Image (cartoon, rainbow, N blue to C red):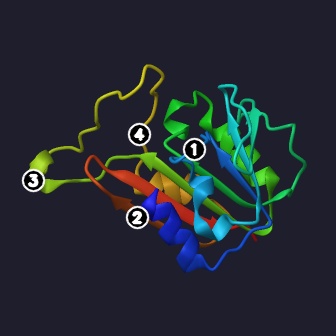
Amino acid sequence: MARFHEILRDSGVRPARALEVGGVLGANSLLRAPQLEGAERYALNLVEMESRAGVTAVTGNANDMHMFDDASFDLVMSNATLEHDRHFWKSLAEMWRVLRSGGFLIICVPGYVKDPERDRGKRTATYKIHYRFDYYRFSEQAVRDVFFEGMERVEVAALMRPPRIVGHGYKP
């Protein structure tokens, strides 16, 4: 969460409308970033939640975000969600669709990176399942070349252990 807030701060983005895909309400919501104060904020989740504290809860599947118009958000964020999505590419397409031109996209997923100490030069290990619906781990290359394909000023980095891959970019 701290990295998302740092990315937003450094980007200078001050969106009028923001969406968190796989969003939660309360203290762990990415929508609590100070840069989003005053923005219209939406949290999309499969689990039904009640709107509160200035965040509109929307129940639905990110594979089909028909409830949102094309190009209707300045900012779309997703953290620790796509690995649980059987059809994550559909959600990526929907994120792209609802993001306006010039809008900012931030995604964080569990990943794998080569770790010579751990892997002893032979292979890259993946990590244990952390939830009952846990399908994928992503490389930095996948995040850069698949998640942010066609976007501008893309940055991707691995952090933490086990690694999380964080990427962000602007829709042309």
**Rendered residue at 49%/42% (across/down):** 80
Q: Nearer the viewer, residue 127 or 74?
A: 74
Q: Residue at x 57, y 48 (%)?
A: 29
Amino acid type indicated by mark 2: Ala
| Nearer-N-terminus badge (1/3) | 1
Camera-side mark, 1 or 3 = 1
Question: Do the numbered discs 2 and 4 sit on residues whose CB atoms are within 8 Å?
Answer: no
Amino acid carrying label 4: it is: Arg
Left-right relation of 100 to 37: right
Question: Does residue 45 appear anywhere in the picture?
Answer: yes
Answer with mark 2 or mark 4, whichever residue precedes in sequence: 4
Whether label 2 touches label 1, CB < 8 Å: no
Reading the image, the residue beneath label 2 is: 157
Q: Which mark is residue 117?
A: 3
- Which numbered disc covers residue 26? 1
Callout 1 amino acid: Gly
Going from N to C along the chain, the mark reached first, 3 or 4, is 3
Q: Which mark is first along the chain, 3 or 2?
A: 3
Where residue 130 sits in the image (x, y, percent)?
Answer: 36, 29
Q: Nearer the viewer, mark 1 or mark 4?
A: 1
Q: Quadrant of the C terminus?
A: bottom right
CB under 8 Å between discs 3 and 4: no
Q: Is residue 142 left or right of residue 57?
A: left
Say few, some or many: other residues with alpha carbon within 10 Å of mark 2 (under 14 / 14 to 19 / 20 or more). some
Kindly state the secondary structure of the residue where label 3 is placed. Answer: helix
Which mark is first along the chain, 4 or 1? 1
Q: Dot 4: what SS?
A: loop
Residue for point 68% across, 40% down = 91
Q: Earlier in the sequence, mark 2 or mark 1?
A: 1
Task: Give how far apart the Cα atoms at labels 2 and 1 are.
Answer: 27 Å
Inspect the image, locate mark 3, and give the three-letter code of the amino acid beneath it. Glu
